[in-house]
Amino acid sequence: MKKDKGNNQAEGTISDGVIALKNLTKEFGDNVVLDNISLAIEKGKTTVIIGPSGCGKTVLIKHLIVLLRPSAGEVYFEKRRIDNLSESELNKIRTHYGFLFQGGALFDSLSVAENIMFPIKQHYRITDHSGVEELVKTKLAMVGLDGFQKFYPASLSGGQRKRVALARAIALNPDVILYDEPTTGLDPIRADIINELILKLQKGLGLTSVVVTHDMTSAYKIADRIIMLHNGKIIADGNAEHIRNHPHPTVQQFINGQVSEDDLAVLRMSGSIPQAQFLPRDFEE
């Protein structure tokens, strides 16, 4: 899969995407974070969004679920425009989405089971409590944590908290899961557990996944498609092989973790390291 058709790539392809952005721009004051982006998210595939900090990755995925509304342009879900809907109408649409927040965003005062029940209670009136308990058990089993229902977030490791948050994200049997930096703060082994779960859910449940990450090891493992944002625009779009061999220097600097020559020049001109450093006793009277 090789793309790089720029911001016109979603023109005429909205019908092909479970989610689509058309000429989307987002401004915060004078700061243009997303600049006329068109994009169709393919159903049943994992799309990974990469790019430097502050390039608009999280802002982009928040538009997919309309947690943010565009300054200009349109957002579609299943061919229906949704960015112009009321909040009550959006609440119905959002039952089709799961969202794994960067820090997990678990409620510390709620048990694991209560955290997973939370979105169910927000959208439905529960009458079958035993059925909900069985649902919680099933979701926890899917992330390898059945038996943790009565634990509280403070007693869990970082990886376990991410997995509980993922169980909560799939509580409503969504069609789409949005992941915001799912492996951040995890060691390589725990990060790979999250990668395996993303793959398991995408393949086992046929979910559409959109993942924001800085972790290229994760991106290469889970992605059917990788999109790179830079200065509010899409500068690369294709499969892992295409991105690895992309000719754009900014893409190569990012995926290989290289500082640009311009940035190096600024660092080298920023002053020399002093010969002597202060000691605590230098400040004593």
Image (cartoon, grey):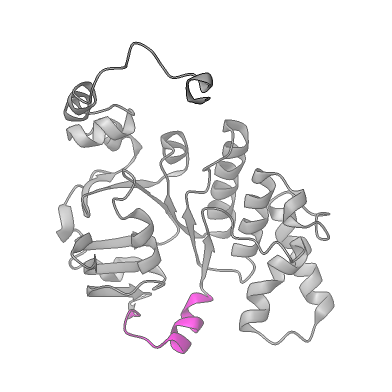
Given the current orientation, which residue lies at the most extreme front position?
285
Is residue 130 shown left or right of residue 267? right
**Please, is residue 269 above or below residue 143 in the view?**
above
Residue 136 falls within the magenta-colored stretch: no
From the top left corner, tell me how far across and down residue 232 is, in percent: 22, 55
From the top left corner, tell me how far across and down residue 118 is, in percent: 67, 73
Q: Is residue 180 visible?
A: yes
Quadrant of res 158: top right
Q: Residue at image x 64%, y 68%?
A: 171
- Which quadrant would the N terminus be assigned to in this image? top left
**Please, is residue 134 above or below residue 239 in the view?**
below
The one of 147 and 270 positioned closer to us in this rendering: 270
From the top left corner, tell me how far across and down residue 112 is, in percent: 75, 61
**Please, is residue 152 above or below residue 254 in the view?**
below
**Please, is residue 189 above or below residue 167 in the view?**
above
Q: Residue at image x 51%, y 73%?
A: 96
Quadrant of res 39: bottom left
Q: Residue at image x 48%, y 20%?
A: 282
From the top left corner, tell me how far across and down residue 234 is, in percent: 22, 51
Residue 82 falls within the magenta-colored stretch: yes
Magenta part of the protein: which range?
81-95
Is residue 158 shown left or right of residue 271? right
Is residue 117 shown left or right of residue 242? right
